[in-house]
Image: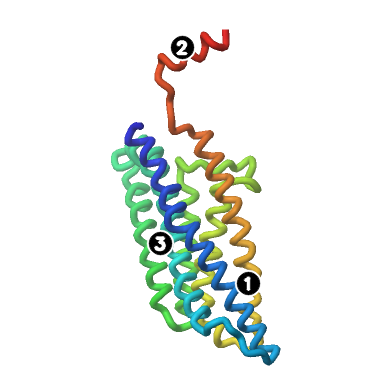
Amino acid sequence: MSIEQFTLLIHPFFTIVAVFPLIGIVSYFAWETRQRRLEIKEGDKSKIPPSVGLNHVILGKWLSSAVVIASLIGLARPIIAKNIIKNELWATNFFQFIFIILMFVFSIISFVFLFRSRGKLWRGIFATLSGMGIVILGCQDGIFRRGNEWFWSHYYYGIVVSLLMIFSVAIIDDIYRDRSNKWRNIHIILNCLALLLFLGQGITGSRDLFEIGLWTPPPALVIKSINLII
């Protein structure tokens, strides 16, 4: 396996090790939190500990961070390999080269500030800037988008999931302050959609790896296979 082929595995490796385990854990705590809330609302004494809500929030932030990191890794690899290095962008288009680097830095800083912001206005600003950064990076040359099948595209699923995770972080404080449960219901609906998209990510990601092709059989094996067919 060449270094170029190995770099293709960084994004799926991080997703499998960090993102998908967190999806299961966060989904479990989300279910437990809702069940506890419903039991208390009906006047029953719940056996589910109060800590499930806090755990859901903490691990939910971890999941959002892991998804955004995975998306940036997934965008960085093709941009670097198929755009910056292939086109020698630092020599042919220095402005675009600097712009891409600054967009990565800009997106990361905006997402970090989103976690540190407490005011509703600033959370909205940094959530918007983080989302814009990811979308703009996703529009760069070199990325495999499958635009003719956008409804079954690993790229588009990933962008939407990243935006949903950013939005979830931005509305955490609103969920607990809103007595009408409007933001809580929005959070539930959007994250159920995100869960479906995560399942789609597992399928489309595996398919795209097969299409890109990581392994090239040695010539002797190819000749042997041809002889067997003949």
Above or below residue 2? Residue 63 is below
Furthest toward the right, the residue is 42
Q: Position of residue 83 (x, y in %)?
A: 39, 40
Mark 2 falls on what kind of element? helix
Above or below residue 54? Residue 144 is above
Whole-angstrom CA distance, mark 2 to mark 1, is 55 Å
Q: Which residue is mark 1?
A: 188
Q: Which of the image's four quarters has the C terminus?
A: top right
Residue visible at 51% across and 8% down in the picture: 227
Q: Is residue 190 left or right of residue 224?
A: right
Q: Position of residue 177 (x, y in %)?
A: 56, 87
Above or below residue 141? Residue 58 is below
Furthest toward the left, the residue is 91
Residue visible at 41% across and 52% down in the picture: 14
Which class describes the residues within 10 Å of circle 3: few (<14), some (14-19), or many (20+)?
many
Decide: marks 2, 1 in contact (CB < 8 A)?
no
Looking at numbered disc 3 in the image, what kind of residue is underneath it? Ser
Q: Which residue is mark 3?
A: 107
Mark 3 falls on what kind of element? helix
- The residue nearer to you, when weighing 38 against 83, is 38
N-term mark: 3 or 2: 3
N-term mark: 1 or 3: 3
Looking at numbered disc 2 in the image, what kind of residue is underneath it? Ile
Q: Nearer the viewer, mark 1 or mark 3?
A: 1
Looking at numbered disc 1 in the image, what kind of residue is underneath it? Ile
Which class describes the residues within 10 Å of circle 2: few (<14), some (14-19), or many (20+)?
few
Q: Is residue 11 left or right of residue 38?
A: left
Q: Which residue is mark 2?
A: 223
Q: Position of residue 168 (x, y in %)?
A: 53, 71
The image quarter containing residue 88 is top left
